Image (cartoon, rainbow, N blue to C red):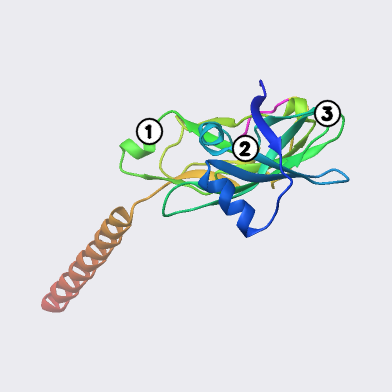
Amino acid sequence: MANRIVEADNRNEFGKGPSGRLRRSGKLPGIIYGRSDTMPITLDEHDFYQTFKQISESTIITIRTPGKDVDVLLKDYDEDLATGHLRHVDFYAIESGQLLRANVPIHLTGAAPGVREGGVLQSQIHEVEVECFPKDIPENFQLDISGLQIGDALHVSDLPDLEGVKVLNSEDQTIALVAVTREEVEEEVEEEEMEGEEGLEEGEEAGEAEEAEE
């Protein structure tokens, strides 16, 4: 998986005042941490947002600053919900020879036959935590649901095995299942109640017939 490259400048001013001025000029304050020292940076908000829409926590980004490039993962961000603009981003620096942990999204593929039969597809988790070297980190896990009937489920143990990648979640943790709808449950209960009532009526009629014969 090719790294995404993002251009950045070093940032020397801090606090609400300087950060506000940066945002008004179309810039985005950020910081890189994870090594012995932190690196405050400034990005172009519009350019980075185009990258931001296409990445996850497991996407390796190369931050290109004057003097050096740093490989990072996106760890946190602050977004203005009213405007949709990013206000601040945090990155975690990684090193090629060191194991890292990251959350990798799960993408469900295919169509479950159980849904066509009236079931409801329920996703229990949307990502798993993995441990691996940076070169082995997957962008996502693809999980085929085309074999799921009503009542079937897929678990972490059903994820594909990727070389060099260790999934840290419990193997029996449910990822997705096709559940029976509430309407179907109510119909089954009603049918059972009707069968029970019919059984009682038949029993009463048989009892009355025996009494008449006596």
Residue found 65% across the figure and 32% down from its top: 59
Residue 162 place in picture, x, y as percent: 70, 26
Disc ID at residue 96: 3
The verdict on residue 15 being magenta is: no
Badge 1 amino acid: Pro
Say whether residue 135 is left or right of residue 203. right
Q: Earlier in the sequence, mark 1 or mark 2?
A: 2
Q: Reading the chain from its start, which is encountered first: label 3 or label 1?
A: 3
In the rendered image, residue 159 lying in the magenta stretch gets the answer: yes
Q: Say what amino acid the circle numbered 3 marks.
A: Ser
User: Residue 192's spot in the image, x, y percent?
Assistant: 29, 61
Residues at marks 3 and 1, CA–CA distance in whole angstroms: 43 Å
Magenta stretch secondary structure, dominant: loop
Q: Secondary structure at mark 2?
A: strand
Write down the quadrant of residue 140 in the picture. Answer: top right
Q: Which mark is residue 113?
A: 1
- How far apart marks 1 and 2 lie (CA) works out to 47 Å
Q: Nearer the viewer, residue 208 or 154?
A: 154
| Position of residue 85 in the picture relative to residue 138 (left or right) | left
Q: Quadrant of the C terminus?
A: bottom left
Q: Which residue is mark 2?
A: 43
Residue 159 disc label: none
